[in-house]
Amino acid sequence: MTAYFFSDTAALTGRTLRHVTRSMDTIITTVITPVAMMLMFVYVFGGAIDTGSVSYLNYMLPGILLMTIASGISYTAYRLFTDVKSGIFERFQSMPIARSGVLWAHVVTSLVANLIALVLVVGVAVLMGFRSGAGVSAWLAVAGILFLFTLALTWLAVIPGLAASSVEGAGAFAYPLIFLPFVSSAFVPTRTMPGPVRWFADHQPVTSIVNTIRNLFARKPVGDDIWTALAWCLGILVVAYVFAMAAYRRKIS
């Protein structure tokens, strides 16, 4: 059964990846918003924000990377919703394939598409002047955190992809996730925020993830932020996976 699961998932992933490669505008659209925000914040607002000895581009890039992921997973929900409405799930049910492979194919495709988008955004940041003295281990740690965050949000995207009644509903859930970095340490230090807003910013998932990636890039100690970031990512992943599989079982029952 395990062998069939992996082979079936690989075949189905090839199918969904072909959809992405034939329509690269989805990846381009995913990249445009974060890059536009990066350009605006660095060249318009950056001079007014005090980030100490750290360049503002280096300071805010981790938040931009999380925005890129949040923007990208909305297309995961859209692709899944399209498959549901086209009746492809019913056709797959009549075939001797691993049923969960259908969902995992969309998840793997999301990971690949978001990886491409992240590389493009980092490339633009390098052209704008982003530099990091981080070593290989730090870069691998950043990649691991971004991978885990993408995986968690992708399984979260599966839920509206299966349950939404319209295309707009399938993708709309991502909007709060895209704007969540604005109420965090992603663009300004939380110490400048009013009391209740600062409390929320300090205790929501994005702040710990952003702080961890920023310190890794700057070769600074990550402290407890990395454990908080991992706890948030794993917690969201487990809860989203449970609810996504429950939604899938209801959909195919």
Image: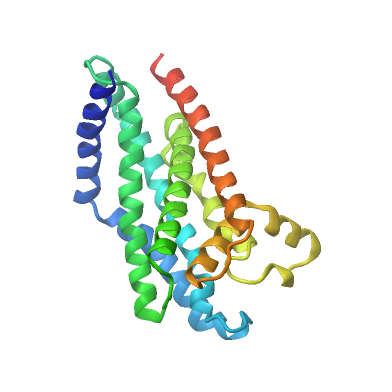
**x and y percentages locating residue 26 in the rendered image:** 31, 53
Quadrant in which residue 36 is drawn: bottom left
Quarter that holds the N terminus: top left
The residue depicted at 49 percent of the width and 77 percent of the height is: 57
Residue found at the far right of this picture:
195
Q: Is residue 169 above or below residue 123?
A: above
Q: Considering depth in this image, is 121 or 218 the residue closer to the camera?
A: 218
**x and y percentages locating residue 161 in the rendered image:** 42, 35
Quadrant in which residue 131 is drawn: bottom left
The residue depicted at 64 percent of the width and 56 percent of the height is: 224
The residue depicted at 65 percent of the width and 52 percent of the height is: 204
Quadrant in which residue 13 is drawn: top left
Q: Count numbered badges in the picture.
A: 0
**x and y percentages locating residue 101 in the rendered image:** 30, 27
**x and y percentages locating residue 159 in the rendered image:** 48, 33
Q: Is 173 on the left or on the right of 17, as rendered?
A: right
Colour scheme of the picture: rainbow
Q: Is 86 on the left or on the right of 197, as rendered?
A: left
Q: Considering depth in this image, is 107 or 159 the residue closer to the camera?
A: 107
Quarter that holds the C terminus: top left
Q: Is residue 249 above or below residue 131?
A: above
The residue depicted at 21 percent of the width and 28 percent of the height is: 7
Q: Is residue 49 above or below residue 117?
A: below
Q: Is residue 166 above or below residue 98?
A: below
